[in-house]
Image (tube, helix red, strand yellow):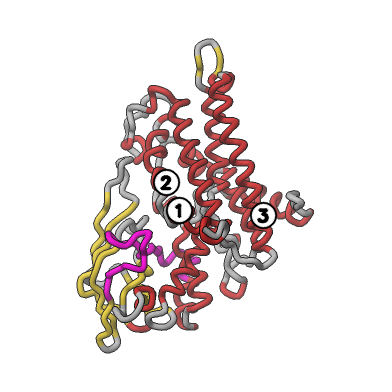
Amino acid sequence: MNLDYTDDQKAFRDEVRAFLDEKLPERLTEKGRGTRALTKADHEEWHAILNEKGWLAGNWPEAFGGAGFDAVQRHILEMEMTRAGAPRIVPFGIAMLGPVLQKFGSKEQQDHYLPRILNGDDWWCQGYSEPGAGSDLASLRCEAVRDGDHYVVNGQKTWTTLGQHANMIFCLVRTSKEGKPQEGISFLLIDMETPGVEVRPIVLIDGGAEVNEVWFSDVRVPVENLVGDENKGWTYAKYLLTHERTNIAGVGFASAGLDSLKRIARAEQDGDRKLIDNPHFAARMARIEIDLMAMATTNLRVVSAAAAGQAPGAESSMLKVKGTIIRQEINALTRTAVGPYAMPFQSEAVEGANEAPIGPDYAAKATGAYLNNRKLSIYGGSNEVQRTIIAKSMLEL
């Protein structure tokens, strides 16, 4: 396999770099790489800049307002944005719901919701998991009962990422208890300002509250907000998850994290030498870099196959498992590099308090990132579930 970019792909990479050099606000880069957390307004600002360029929805066809990029172009854009320190594209509307509506939604739903995703009128969140339905998602109990021109929704969703910012939520709801659990699930679009919707923050181990519980109490949802056919939501959910997991390896994030780790190791002193010159520490960094290079090669193989029209299979599970392990190892080694300054975990400094951080700027996020990213091996399908997929589909066990 030839892992070199073609001349056209190199030209596109250069175009992306030039665009980022000109249009990416330096304060967003400094904020992301420094001590402060990115806000909703920061993400919306960056989305608007990308949308003006026509690159916000690189995965969408041009007919729906997207860039129509192929898999390699999308890979290049993602890698260059993380290299430059740009905020990530919040995935729920662009990468998850958008493709579902384009394939299964009605013309009216496409005409109404897709432009609103692009121009920032709607911020979407994902209503899949429940307290008793995580990896075993088919056991979900949130119920939607037909009542004339509406569904009446009762139940609970949990781990709703950035739900505190959202005005819309796409939900899997139970519309039938007959047959197999997967056969009674529907895909519903719900306005979060509807009476009966309540968002309750969940404070995480890092002190933040980026995930939430969402409660539904007799919430009336118009029937026209049903995507596709009733009781066929499991099909649409699986289609969405293929898009969620395609880039879940996070090669770009891992590469940016490793670069940051190297900068810290060059800045930190270890006795009479720089930390990066410590043979033991350098060997641990080298092992991570070797694993990352191998994963990046595998990722390019998957990207190349996708560009040729092949759907990713168990390879996505392989990338998800390895990618999360690498990112967690980078987080752990970053805390080691920061040393004692990683101990006074400063959630206030990250959230924007006026107090100066203790120690160097890069120390403030070290422990928070380490704690928060323990979730990487759970979301998007736990690593245990991914290993089972690999065992069944590739090893035939």
Q: What residue type is labelled 2?
A: Leu
Which residue is the extreme one toward the front? 397
Q: Where is residue 265 in the image (x, y as percent from the top left)?
A: 53, 25
Which secondary structure, mark 2? loop
Disc 3: which residue: 301
Q: At which x and y percent is residue 32?
A: 47, 41
Identified at 29% across, 87% down, the residue is: 149
Q: Residues within 10 Å of mark 3 (few under 14, many from 20)?
A: some
The residue under label 1 is which amino acid type?
A: His
Answer with the quarter of the image where residue 339 lies.
top left
Q: Which mark is residue 43?
A: 1
- Marks 1 and 2 sit apart, C-alpha to C-alpha, by 7 Å
**Which residue range is magenta in the image?**
116-143
Residue 176 placement (x, y as % from top left):
31, 80
Taking the spot 25% from the left edge, 78% from the top edge, the residue there is 152
Residue depth check, mark 1 versus mark 3: number of the one nearer the observer: 3
Q: Seen in the image, is 334 located left or right of residue 135?
A: right
Taking depth in this image into account, of 229 and 310 the one nearest to the observer is 310
Q: Name the residue under label 2.
A: 38
